[in-house]
Amino acid sequence: MTGRVLTVTLNAALDVTYHVAAFTPGATHRVSRVDERAGGKGLNVARLLHALGTPVVATGLAGGACGARIRSLLADQEVPEAFVPIAAESRRTVVVAEPDTATGLWEPGPTVTADEWHAFLARFTDLVRDAEVAVLSGSLPSGVPADAYRVLVEVARRAGARTVLDTSGDPLRHGLDAGPDLVKPNAEELAGLTGHAPPGPAAAVETVRALDADAVVASFGPEGLLAVTGEGAWHAYLPHPVAGNPTGAGDACVAALTRGMIGRHAWPDRLTEAVALSAAAVRAPVAGSVDLADYRHLLPAVIVKEL
């Protein structure tokens, strides 16, 4: 089983989205529709890459009935997977989606044993030999070492694969120690790293430049993306922000940037695709999905300014 991209989701989830007309805390709601997805940040990336025609294999940890359902849903969508089984039950994530916003409830996830982590590390070491890019995304379940992403970046580098890191907190700090090829924090994650929240993309260049990665693309929600690379710095955005469910928009950004990395596209082109795909994900009714026609419609509207 090979793919140009290998995505890693160590804290995979069964995503459940409840659609309501309006959500009021403390009230009873009638749900118009329920959607299920194989979720977790890396799986959102894998599904989008597969939809865009990029060869991809998804790996990670999955256990129990939720883990089995995650793998079954991936098979239904013909997304190749090589998950390592664990004894504990994988988590669920619940999104209550209104027409223009969403509320998320994230379960903490399973506890992983040392033997299960070592089994995954062996599987990753084998799989990454056939990958051009390894995408390392999301939180770590209990029992997985806090420096797991640092270890995986180093393993990928020895195998000749480039790395994209999208996580937060201590896993992000440790992962940065290995110098990934691309890291994609959001404004909140930047604040966690630096101790203060940058006021906006244009003002955050020096903050981002200090991070230990070959390239950094920071997301600022409706204000767009800030990219700081060895080739320059850019701010990419839409002139009019889109409304909808932002869950999964960051994963769409990572999917687009990964495609651009494989194709060695110019940075302004990568950012144009990342903004458009992220915006299309916001408009989509289910987290981690995108209407590709909407994505192509949004591409010409993206503005990219060199800083």
Image (cartoon, rainbow, N blue to C red):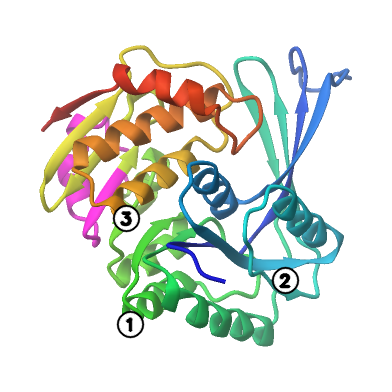
Give the image quarter of residue 226: top left
* Whether label 2 touches label 3, CB < 8 Å: no
Q: Foreground residue, 97 or 288? A: 288
Q: Give the residue displayed 41% in from the left and 40% down from the top.
A: 253
Which amino acid type corresponds to the residue marked 1 in the rendered image? Arg
The mark nearer the N terminus, 2 or 1, is 2
Is residue 9 in view? no
The label nearer to you, 1 versus 3, is 3
Q: Residues within 10 Å of mark 2 (few under 14, many from 20)?
A: some
Q: Give the residue displayed 70% in from the left and 56% down from the top.
A: 108
The label nearer to you, 2 versus 1, is 1
Which amino acid type corresponds to the residue marked 3 in the rendered image? Ile
* Whether label 2 touches label 1, CB < 8 Å: no
The mark nearer the N terminus, 2 or 3, is 2
Q: Which residue is mark 3?
A: 262
Residue 78 position in % (x across, y down): 67, 52
Vertical order, 5 against 273 (above or below):
below
Q: Foreground residue, 225 or 256? A: 256
Q: Which residue is mark 2?
A: 111
